Image (cartoon, rainbow, N blue to C red):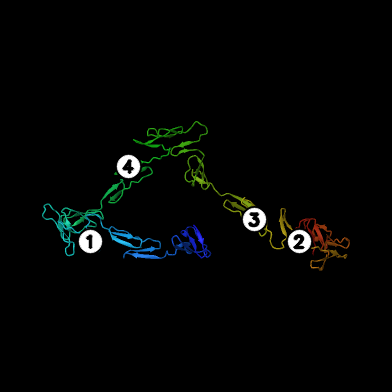
């Protein structure tokens, strides 16, 4: 569609804009002018389409009974009748004319003052056709054999006549009338013994039965001949034909012949007999080839010993003779044949145990093993059925713990501050260092019972902290008598009276 925007707020179109124009509301023009049809369009935001601006102007016309509504673009049609002809001229004028039959027998003509009737009065018609001299029927009563009769309030009739009416006939029939027809409703009337019209019965019925059920068929009913899977019914003229439906597949062995249905059976190694009452069909089992396990059992048919039976639904009830296992291919449930010969589903619950060294849990088929995260461990299950455990590292600022291929490590290189340590040469060594705030702090090392702290004898500034020598005692109940001083460390050489094991290092405090 060609669109020209002239910048005045309108768009010009050469067709209905609903074809391919959707404006951006609030940005594009929502008024369109179609010059070729002199049509103005506006965009209906609620309906999201273009509407003719004059589409809501409606003209109503009525004949006093029925009212018609005409919208913009509708056509107001004046329809000719059998006697009236409408003519529309180029001056927007509609002229109505009476249609007169051009037959030479027509007595009606048109004049400037209106319609004119030219009556030719003869033997059968009298009067001038005016209010003062109405037309009358002139019946010939002189000519012999004239059976035309006029009866007051009934009009003309012919004795034994058939009366035709556009509605029901009722009351007294015309003199000598015999039969009447209501051609509007298709009803036939006769004149009863009282001389009145009486309608012939309109409903007739008969019964039809299949030997079990009887159905009454009345006037207007239809007898339906219904096809079945094997029988085809057809109605032609007054005949009903029934045909056997034969499968057109090349595999069917049934065909139709002039004498009836024919069955063609090809007997081979596995099938014997002609398929007739005198030669029944039989299954022929190969009893010569080794390994054949097909067996036929009276009343049950063919079976294979130890066979596996498959189906798309649950197996239940008695299993076929020789069957051992069955499979429901829809659900995957496996069945076995129990001691009573019935199908029984194989238990579908299997289990195994899992333990953390303290607690053991039994896991069955329907259970779910859950790997629960802890504050420091994160479990992840991948699509490859792998469970991965990872250490959770805090993202809090200042955390120096990191992870690499060999595991966790503490990275404190960013926090290290060089500190100079000095010590004096006194009996109890003292370390002096400068802290991060620039102040000098001192830490004094004092030996305790069982601990030897030296420093003065180490000119290289090394402070040595060592455990004092201790003696092994077999029984600390006599520790004090055995020479163990309070605060001194000693090691048991045997189980003491308190049940402590050999080799335990203790400190006497009492």
* Labelled disc at residue 414: 2
The kind of secondary structure element at disc 3 is strand
CA separation, marks 1 and 3?
A: 112 Å
Give the residue at mark 1: 116
Residue 442 found in image quarter? bottom right
Q: Check the image and report above or below for 438 versus 275.
A: below
CA separation, marks 4 and 2?
A: 106 Å
Q: Which of marks 4 and 3 precedes in the sequence?
A: 4
Q: Residues within 10 Å of mark 3 (few under 14, many from 20)?
A: some
CA separation, marks 4 and 1?
A: 65 Å
Give the residue at mark 4: 241
Q: In front: 500, or 58?
A: 58
Give the residue at mark 3: 379
Q: In the shown orientation, is residue 403 left or right of residue 466?
A: left
Residue 393, percent from left and from top: 69, 59
Q: Which of marks 2 and 3 precedes in the sequence?
A: 3
Q: Which of marks 1 and 2 precedes in the sequence?
A: 1
Residue 457, percent from left and from top: 89, 61
Residue 195 in sight in this render: no
The kind of secondary structure element at disc 2 is helix
CA separation, marks 3 and 2?
A: 31 Å
Q: In front: 262, or 302?
A: 262
Q: Residues within 10 Å of mark 2 (few under 14, many from 20)?
A: few
């Amino acid at each position: 569609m060609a669109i020209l925007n002239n910048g005045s707020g309108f768009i010009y179109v050469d067709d209905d804009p609903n074809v391919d124009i959707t404006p951006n509301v609030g940005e594009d023009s929502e008024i369109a002018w179609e010059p070729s049809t002199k049509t103005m369009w506006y965009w209906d935001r609620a309906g999201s389409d273009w509407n003719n601006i004059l589409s809501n102007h409606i003209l109503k016309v009525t004949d006093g009974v029925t009212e018609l509504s005409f919208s913009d673009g509708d056509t107001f049609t004046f329809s000719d009748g059998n006697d009236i002809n409408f003519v529309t001229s180029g001056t927007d004028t509609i002229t109505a004319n009476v249609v007169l039959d051009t037959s030479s027998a027509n007595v009606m003509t048109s004049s400037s003052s209106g319609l004119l009737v030219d009556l030719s009065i003869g033997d059968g018609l009298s009067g001038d056709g005016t209010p003062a001299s109405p037309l009358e029927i002139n019946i010939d009563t002189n000519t012999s054999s004239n059976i035309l009769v006029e009866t007051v309030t009934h009009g003309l009739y012919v004795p034994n006549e058939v009366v035709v009416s556009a509605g029901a006939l009722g009351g007294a029939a015309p003199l000598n009338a015999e039969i009447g027809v209501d051609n509007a409703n298709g009803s036939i009337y006769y004149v009863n013994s009282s001389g009145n019209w009486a309608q012939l019965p309109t409903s007739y019925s008969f019964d039809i039965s299949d030997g079990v059920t009887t159905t009454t068929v009345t006037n207007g009913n239809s007898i339906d001949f219904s096809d079945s899977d094997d029988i085809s019914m057809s109605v032609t003229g007054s005949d009903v034909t029934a045909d056997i439906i034969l499968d057109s597949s090349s595999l069917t062995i049934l065909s139709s012949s002039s004498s009836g249905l024919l069955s063609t059976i090809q007997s081979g190694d596995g099938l014997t007999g002609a398929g007739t009452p005198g030669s029944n069909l039989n299954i022929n089992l190969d009893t010569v080839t080794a390994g054949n396990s097909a067996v036929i059992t009276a009343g049950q048919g063919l079976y294979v010993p130890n066979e596996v039976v498959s189906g798309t639904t649950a197996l239940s009830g008695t299993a076929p003779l020789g069957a051992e296992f069955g499979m429901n291919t829809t659900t995957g449930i496996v069945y076995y044949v129990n001691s009573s010969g019935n199908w029984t589903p194989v238990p579908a619950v299997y289990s195994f145990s899992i333990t953390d060294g303290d607690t053991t849990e039994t896991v069955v088929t329907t259970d779910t093993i859950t790997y629960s995260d802890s504050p420091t461990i994160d479990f992840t299950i991948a699509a490859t059925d792998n469970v991965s455990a990872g250490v959770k590292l805090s993202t809090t600022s200042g955390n120096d713990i990191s992870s690499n291929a060999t595991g966790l490590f503490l990275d404190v290189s960013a926090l290290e501050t060089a500190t100079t340590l000095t010590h004096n040469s006194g009996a109890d060594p003292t370390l002096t260092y400068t802290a991060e705030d620039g102040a000098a702090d001192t830490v004094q090392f004092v030996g305790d019972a069982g601990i030897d702290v030296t420093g003065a004898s180490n000119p290289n500034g090394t402070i040595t902290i060592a455990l004092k020598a201790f003696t092994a005692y077999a029984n600390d109940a006599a520790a004090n008598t055995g020479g163990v001083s309070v605060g001194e460390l000693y090691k048991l050489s045997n189980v003491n009276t308190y049940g402590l094991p050999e080799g335990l290092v203790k400190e006497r405090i009492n």
